[in-house]
Image: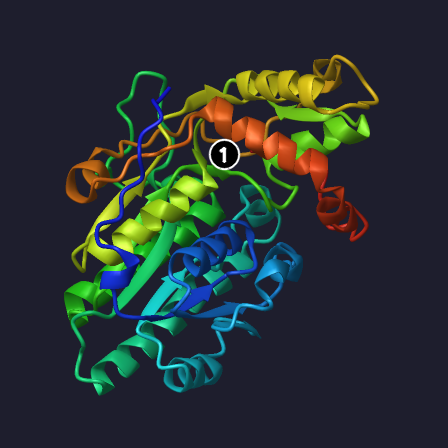
Amino acid sequence: MQTNTSKQVTGTVAERQPGRILITGGAGFIGSNFVRYWCDRYPQDRVVVLDALTYAGNLANLADLESHPEFRFVRADICDRSLVDDLLRSEEINTVAHLAAESHVDRSILGPEAFVQTNLVGTFTLLEAFRQRWQSRGQPTDWRFLHVSTDEVYGSLSPTDPAFSETTPYAPNSPYSASKAGSDHLVRSYFHTYGMPTLITNCSNNYGPYHFPEKLIPLLCINILLGKPLPIYGDGQNIRDWLFVEDHCSALDCVIQQAQPGETYNIGGNNEVSNLDLVDLLCDLMDEIAPDLPTRPARQLITFVKDRPGHDRRYAIDARKIQADLGWSPAVTLPEGLRRTVEWYVTHPDWWQPLLTRNQLPEPITA
């Protein structure tokens, strides 16, 4: 468990020239939190969000930004090359933060084609559009293309293996992680082939507000509030490293502002915990915070279900490089982050209840 340390981004906002950033996938979970972070920290920047609003994209995630004078939302597919070209040109974009992705392992098992299309073809489309725009403008040295990826590209760890570092060989075990691994390689190739100012980050499991309720933590929060079973794959001993989404946003900011082109950074929360232990923590918090739970104690709802195919046993991130190079470390402890997350879901049924009526959540879905 990490201590509460300070986030660091060098340079003040006043010292920095206004930028023009395109954020793909900005209506999703991590994307919307990053959009909100960027608008708060750099209110003078032009912020353009490109999102196709597939099942996990939600305009309600960005509702509080509608009045921001420099914010623009564009509903479109990242594979639409002519639209991307026009957007980069008309908005004079100099930074791309590429967060758009199909991102759930279970869905990739059921329908891998969408993951190849979005994660590989979509990333290629953005790279080509940015490359041609960057070259046509004389290859400015201050432009950046940030590709946000996942620790799942590294495969699975045993309980005694060292954590994933930036030099860990890739070994993806699902169509999702394979598609992300392929996109990572494409981004890396554009730096080495064309000299394009690319950056790659590989993060551990995120959690926090606006998380689509197919993933473990929001699903558990909502199911506890509704008195529904809490489905846990296998024996519940699969281990993940959990990163509060606001910490992830500050890390991405550090990478964009400070990292040298061509670099890759792992971003983790220093919070390894088994799925079953995580469920216990959430149940305790819900028992404490939520006033009218249908079932108390909430852990009575825990239900073990058949394990999913290719379920990686353990992920763990070694984030020493980003701390050494850029001075970043996570600021939110797991107990603090979980409490803030539970409080958000308890107080925002107006956000998650409409999602349940779409009949888009496969059962069961867990981490």
Name the spot of residue 183 as percent of width and height, x first: 36, 58
Asked whether, in this view, residue 164 is left or right of residue 88, the answer is: left
26 or 288, which lies in front? 288
Q: Is residue 11 above or below residue 140?
A: above
**Snapshot quadrant of residue 44:** bottom left
For residue 312, say whether it is visible. yes
**Snapshot quadrant of residue 347:** top right
* Residue in the image at 63% along x and 24% along y: 232
* Residue in the image at 26% along x and 55% along y: 12
Secondary element at tag 1: loop
* Residue in the image at 46% along x and 25% along y: 334
Amino acid type assigned to the residue bearing label 1 in the image: Gly
Q: How is the image coloured?
A: rainbow
Q: Is residue 298 above or below residue 222?
A: above
Name the spot of residue 223 as percent of width and height, x first: 74, 31
257 or 121, which lies in front? 257
Name the spot of residue 349 as percent of width and height, x first: 75, 42
Name the spot of residue 326 as percent of width and height, x first: 20, 44
Q: Is residue 53 above or below residue 92?
A: above
Residue indicated by mark 1: 310
